[in-house]
Amino acid sequence: MDGILLVDKPAEWTSMDVCAHLRGVLHEKHIGHTGTLDPNATGLLVVLAGKGTKAAKYAENDAKEYIARLRLGVATDTQDIWGNVLEQKDGERGREQIEAVLEQFRGPILQLPPMYSAIKIRGKKLYEIARRGGSVEREPRPITIYRLAVTDRDEAGDWGLEIECSKGTYIRTLCADIGAALGCGGCMSALRRVRAGRFTVDQAHTLEEIRSDPERYILPLELITQGGQT
């Protein structure tokens, strides 16, 4: 079965968990995706099936859009609330203070990849080193933040962020860096991907829906291979 599946990834599933599950659903061993989501993140995962896995190169440079929550005053080893707390400070900051530091993160910037990531250095994934308590020197990588805006503040005191960015952007790291710029530290408390290239989460389906009628939700590969990027 060749084509594209737009999945609304649930929390607590890795991107590869989704692919492994769909191998069984579709009875197709060739399943991949065009961009990893962290296990606790939700939202759009673009999955490629069959010959579609060879089309991944057409989506490599697609911009992505996210809705995130930023918790100030808490720094963790994973840069999100699911990690071990390294430091806690008074994180009370007003909207104007946050807005004042966001400009330095817009446009082309350099971002240091987190240790808890799948990037390989000398053949080892960084998260494997981090889980053993280790750390290695990393080089900052060029990314682009096309749009970055504060939206609201919830009952827990976390701030909403809307982010449109290039490939290779770690939203966890962006949240941690914003917190550092504010002098109080910060981490990501929620993440949802709402767009990848031309596709939006409104077009995506749950795994339950896909299991019920897989062929109904397969999209043609031409959506990626012929002018698919927006």
Image (spheres, helix red, strand yellow):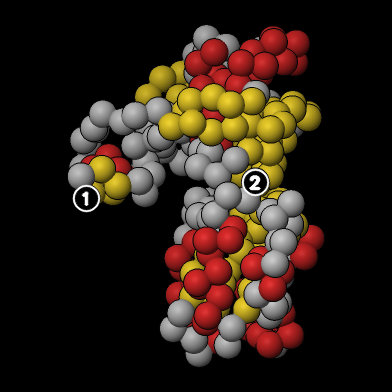
Q: Position of residue 106 (x, y in %)?
A: 65, 23
**In the displayed structure, does residue 28 sit left or right of residue 182?**
left
Check residue 197 in the rendering and tell me which mark sits there, or answer none.
none
Check residue 63 in the rendering and tell me which mark sits there, or answer none.
2
**In the displayed structure, does residue 67 sit left or right of residue 132?**
right
Q: Position of residue 191 (x, y in %)?
A: 61, 44
Q: Residue at x 77, y 65 (%)?
A: 203
Q: Residue at x 20, y 45 (%)?
A: 122
Which amino acid does the dot numbered 2 rest on?
Answer: Ala
Q: Residue at x 21, y 35 (%)?
A: 134
Which amino acid does the dot numbered 1 rest on?
Answer: Gly
Q: Can you say which quadrant of the picture contains the N terminus?
A: bottom right
Residue 76, quarter of the rendered image:
top left
- Asked if one can make out residue 85 in the rendered structure from this viewpoint, the answer is no
Q: Say above or below: 94 vs 28.
A: above
Q: CA distance from mark 1 to mark 2?
A: 28 Å
Q: Residue at x 50, y 72 (%)?
A: 54
Residue 153, quarter of the rendered image:
top right
Query: Badge 1 is on which residue?
Result: 123
**In the displayed structure, does residue 210 sit left or right of residue 122?**
right
Badge 1, how many Cα within 10 Å: few under 14, some, many 20+? few
Q: Position of residue 40 (x, y in %)?
A: 53, 51
- Tag 1 and tag 2, C-beta contact below 8 Å: no
Tell me the element at label 2: loop
- Asked if one can make out residue 223 in the rendered structure from this viewpoint, the answer is yes
